[in-house]
Image (spheres, rainbow, N blue to C red):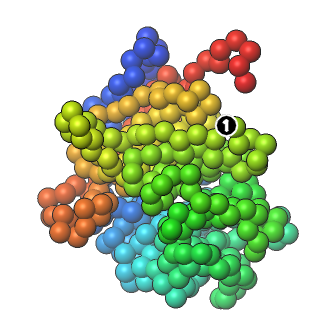
Amino acid sequence: MSTLFGQAANTGGGTGNTTGDISKDIALTSPPDDGISDVKFSPQSEHLAVASWDKKVRIYEINAQGGSEGKALFEHEQPVLSCCWSKDGTKVVGAGADRAARMMDLGSGNTTTAQQVAAHDAPIRCARFVDIPSQAGQMLVTGSWDKTIKYWDLRQSTAVASVQCQERVYSIDVMNTLLVVATADRYIDIVNLSEPTKFYKTMQSPLKWQTRVVTCFNDGSGFAVGSIEGRCAIQYVEEKDSNANFSFKCHRSQASTNNTNVYSVNAISFHPQHGTFSTAGSDGTFHFWDKDAKHRLKGYPEVGGSITSTDFDRTGNIFAYAVSYDWSKGYAANTPNLPNKVMLHAVQADECKPRPKAGGRK
């Protein structure tokens, strides 16, 4: 039976083989010219937004064969560090080192220009669209190295609210009414969007080293944290679920009998249907995990460079990963021969399905 990208579905003995296949992964056509900072699929269609250090956000259309075509592009004045889509799939926002967030309204037919919709006093590290229960229409939340998060009504030129964080914002994510903000010094601020200007809870990361990424569970009950020290933590918001919190080592390799190479966890993405998740890192590998069974489902070979960002499409049938320098070894290691590409992996039937639960296990 033919599946996405024309591959035959892998139905035989999948649970026994934990090494995945990347030989049929397809490269995105005409990728950025510089480092890739973020990739995000539209929640409504097979379009992919790609943010880059070349100061551009590009939007590609992906077809069923894995082919891709550039459909729109807009520019910032400095490197773009983040991109996101509105819930209806008509708007794309980029945020970056020019201390601005810029939005392109694809619904208007515009494919080349964006309007500025947010500003900070320092680079904006991340942006997400959010639904505030007390507000009509989606709003934008931005997190910056100026140590604030700000909420923006896209019809106004000034922020609706600004919230002071403890340190520079490194990563944010949102699901339903849960907003998670990770900052320098390992602080994690949890916001209930019913009260968007208050921290529902503040904690230190359960991981001992700098936070690289936070990503919310699909049901909004918690989040995953990745650090620069090859570890991932699963963290629930409510104390009643705390016995389900745990952390694990990943993205490490044995250098010798007594030495281990440890790599940053740069990206975590949850499968939209199964609730399993991926980690990807500086070691150039990605893995699929089942948090409930505390089990690795699949691990994949090294892809030829660090992986900086990942995302599943809305169906969970495509997994996009960006291969690009992640600055983990400083500016001196950023050589011209390093790859800048986005790969599309067709997710096979057995790759992301959770393990069957043992009898009676919850």
Name the residue nearer the viewer: 297 or 160.
Answer: 297
Relative image position of residue 46 (x, y in whole percent): 51, 48
Residue 270 drawn at (x, y percent): 56, 43
For residue 166, which quarter of the picture? bottom right
Q: Residue furthest front?
A: 258
How many numbered tags mark residues here?
1
Q: Position of residue 155 (x, y in %)?
A: 70, 82
Q: Could you tell me which residue is drawn at 71 percent across and 19 percent down? A: 361
Q: Residue at x 14, y 59 (%)?
A: 337
**Pick the front one: 152 or 289:** 289
Is residue 103 depicted above or below 18 in this figure? below
- Specify the quadrant that holds the C terminus: top right
Displayed quadrant of residue 258: top left
Looking at the picture, which amino acid does disc 1 mark?
Ala
Left or right placement of residue 306 versus residue 360 in this view: left
In this view, 145 is above or below 18: below
State the residue lying farthest toward the right.
134
In the rendered image, residue 313, in percent from the top left (x then y), is placed at: 52, 45
* Residue 142 in sight: yes
Callout 1 secondary element: helix
Crowd band around label 1 with a 10 angstrom C-alpha radius: few (<14), some (14–19), many (20+):
few
> To which residue does mark 1 refer?
244
Q: Nearer the viewer, residue 339 or 295?
A: 295
Judged left or right of residue 128, residue 322 is left
120 relative to 244 in the view: left or right:
left
Could you tell me if residue 94 is visible in this image?
Answer: no
Tell me the residue at 68%/46% (across/down).
236
Q: Residue at x 19, y 36 (%)?
A: 256
